[in-house]
């Protein structure tokens, strides 16, 4: 959850559909759910950037089926989502937050919980993500890395989904408002909970019918710092891999010339 990927636990099923947008405390929310649900949590951003390469490729396939929006694409999309989340107790962050209607169909007993924050500060926070993800050299740097070589194309597919749902190419506070209204339209009122991680254990435990953990502080993970660390990590890994590749090519050329 912003720090390291979760590993699926056989037999575990989705109990919570995290419907909050990125940068609404989803990493802290995921860590709290891991304690309350006693199972691994699929945090979309973490799994896409640090998880097995198959996970980002599965999301891309599901997003392509979603974008096609035909009757023949629906069943393959649902199968991909179910396979992706098999072994997890909850899903949080994007793109799960944009697949809420489909996930409700797959997991009819799951609670839908949307993490919230001040829309103005959310807009500022999203600008940080845009800074990292739209670096002009990013695709080239990540090319030697399995999984992450697909990251820029994955972001493009996410963008298509967001534009269709929220009618904005660049996320603003209006995107935030539209997401909240969309959830109210697609999720039954008795199944939808809005939750601010600043409120700690009590409201979350009440929504899930769980006891408040004793002598355990609520986890607070700085999403911004986690994203900065992940971005720096992959850029360093990509540059290192390129240095090895180019160094090997140079040595080979020298050997041929010699």
Image: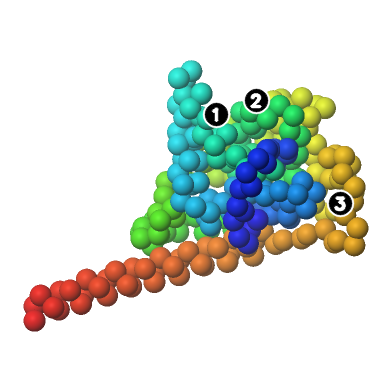
Q: Quadrant of residue 68?
A: top left
Please, is residue 118 above or below residue 191 in the view? below
Residue displayed at 45% across by 20% down: 72
- The residue that label 2 is drawn on is 105
| Vertical arrangement, residue 178 with respect to residue 211, above or below | above
Location of residue 167 in the rendering, given as x and y in whole percent from the top left corner: 57, 33
Q: Is residue 126 visible?
A: no
Q: Nearer the viewer, residue 132 or 76?
A: 76
Q: Seen in the image, is 153 located left or right of residue 88?
A: left
Residue sitting at x 45%, y 59%: 135
Mark found first going from the N terminus, 1 or 2: 1
Q: Position of residue 141 (x, y in %)?
A: 38, 62
Q: Earlier in the sequence, mark 3 or mark 2?
A: 2
| First along the sequence among labels 3 and 1 | 1
Q: Quadrant of the C terminus?
A: bottom left
Residue at which label 3 appears: 201
Q: Is residue 215 left or right of residue 153?
A: right
Who is closer to the viewer here, 102 or 14?
A: 14
Measuring from the top left, give residue 177's x and y in whole percent: 70, 38
- Kindly report the distance in space between the C-alpha atoms of the residues bearing marks 3 and 2: 28 Å
Determine the CA span between mark 3 and mark 1.
32 Å
Percent x, y of residue 145: 40, 59
- Residue 164 drawn above or below residue 96: above
How many C-alpha atoms fall within 10 Å of the one at disc 2: few (<14), some, or many (≥20)? few
Q: Residues within 10 Å of mark 3 (few under 14, many from 20)?
A: many
Q: Secondary structure at mark 1?
A: helix
């Amino acid at each position: 959850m912003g720090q390291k990927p979760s590993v699926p636990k056989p037999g575990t099923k989705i109990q919570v559909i995290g419907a909050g947008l990125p940068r609404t405390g989803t990493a802290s929310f995921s860590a709290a759910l891991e304690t309350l649900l006693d199972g691994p949590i699929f945090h979309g951003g973490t799994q896409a950037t640090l998880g097995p390469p198959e996970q980002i490729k599965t999301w891309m396939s599901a997003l392509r089926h979603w974008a096609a929006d035909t009757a023949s694409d629906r069943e393959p999309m649902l199968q991909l989502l179910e396979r992706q989340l098999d072994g997890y107790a909850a899903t949080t962050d994007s793109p799960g937050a944009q697949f809420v209607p489909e996930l409700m169909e797959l997991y009819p007993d799951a609670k839908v919980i949307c993490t919230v924050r001040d829309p103005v500060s959310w807009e500022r926070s999203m600008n940080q993500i845009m800074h990292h993800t739209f670096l002009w050299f990013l695709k080239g740097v990540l090319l030697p890395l399995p999984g992450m070589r697909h990251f820029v194309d994955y972001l493009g597919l996410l963008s298509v989904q967001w534009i269709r749902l929220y009618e904005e190419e660049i996320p603003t506070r209006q995107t935030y408002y539209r997401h909240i209204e969309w959830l109210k339209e697609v999720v039954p009122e008795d199944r939808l909970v809005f939750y601010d991680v600043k409120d700690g254990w009590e409201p979350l435990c009440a929504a899930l019918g769980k006891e408040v953990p004793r002598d355990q502080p609520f986890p607070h993970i700085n999403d911004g710092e986690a994203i900065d660390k992940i971005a720096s990590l992959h850029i360093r890994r990509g540059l290192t891999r390129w240095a090895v590749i180019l160094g090997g090519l140079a040595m080979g050329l020298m050997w041929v010339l010699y």
